[in-house]
Amino acid sequence: MKTSDFDFYLPKELIAQTPPEKRDESRLMVVERTSGIFSHRDFHNIIEYLEEGDLLVVNDTKVIPARIFTSAEDKKKREILLIKEIAPFTWETFVKPQRGLNIGDSLTFADDGLTAKVNERTPGGTYILFFSKQPPLDKIGFAPLPPYIKRDYTKPDLHDYDKERYQTVYANSPGAIAAPTAGLHFTPELLEKIKTKGIKTASITLHVGIGTFRPVRADDVEDHTMLPEWFSIPEETTNLIKTAKRVIAVGTTTVRTLETSIEGSGYTNKFIYPPHEFKVVDALITNFHLPKSTLLMLISAFAGRELIMKAYKKAIETGYKFYSYGDAMLIL
């Protein structure tokens, strides 16, 4: 299967720059796999499609404020995205701009005493930085929004706004550098109504890293390799899955975790694309994804590429918002 089979044109104005005022006021497209019927609702209506005995499985990873900037005194202001800590004070990072950055260079930051030395440039284009101390992310870090969301990071109000909204209300386990965005639509009130209806909720953890959003550059889908990401599944979740009427996954990261295992912890580089036989997940809540992305390939495996591409065409025609802060889809 070709990567180009998952391409489509998206007008720039449909890329959401901010979330709706209230989380569950985003739009919801309901896609029925057996009939091919699309319905257009608001996200809070999702409770009408959930039944007593269902199990809603969420990813409780918490986004860390992983974007930091070099100080104005540095010879060139650079943006650093901390990907993962690989040793004490040593982080794999994305740096931009990369021009003029050499091994051995020193970077300075606004926080007193914080510097970093460039130790290595990896074959994947990332940089290994050794910091003089642990970066105080709560003090100097910004929400690691994806590049298609444009922000003026000098404005504190936007900084605080994104730190709160680019996070699910049930986020509990710090470690992600991107949000599991399907979960951004839930409010505590909606979750309470779901519970009252007899629908149980369980959590897994998958720390979203570059594996999830790394672009597919291979011409053939099968030639792409997912980078590993850490996951954990509590015993309570495992037991609930085994007795659930339907398992409804909130987000593609939850799907990848459950299709890897329903117990234990470890790393997964599970890459799901058509055809794939799903063994655990019965329904899926997701956002609208980038062209040619592994996330789009996963939902195409779940619902069929032809049906998903029709749904995306309809979403564009009717003005749904796309990507992280965009609208949602329920696939039954």
Image (spheres, rainbow, N blue to C red):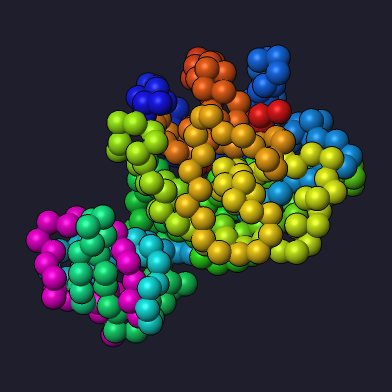
Rendering coords of residue 186 (x, y %): 68, 45
| 3 to 182, vertically: above or below | above
Q: Is residue 110 magenta?
A: yes
Using the image as rendered, state which of residue 85 and residue 153 is in the foreground.
85
Q: Could one spot residue 162 in this view of the protein?
A: no
Using the image as rendered, state which of residue 149 and residue 311 is in the foreground.
311
| 312 to 224, vertically: above or below | above
Q: Count how many numbered circles sit on residues in the image.
A: 0
The N terminus - image quarter: top left
Q: Is 207 on the left or on the right of 45, as rendered?
A: left
Using the image as rendered, state which of residue 261 and residue 46 is in the foreground.
261
- Residue sitting at x 47%, y 72%: 138
Q: Is 146 on the left or on the right of 166, as rendered?
A: left
Range of magenta residues: 89-116
State the image quarter where residue 77 is shown.
Answer: bottom left
- Residue sitting at x 40%, y 72%: 85
Rendering coords of residue 139 (x, y %): 43, 73
Q: Is 300 on the left or on the right of 228, as rendered?
A: right
- Residue sitting at x 11%, y 67%: 102
The C terminus - image quarter: top right
State the image quarter where residue 204 is shown.
Answer: bottom right
Rendering coords of residue 217 (x, y %): 30, 38
- Residue sitting at x 65%, y 44%: 250
Rendering coords of residue 272 (x, y %): 51, 39
Q: Could one spot residue 262 in this view of the protein?
A: yes
Q: Is residue 175 magenta?
A: no
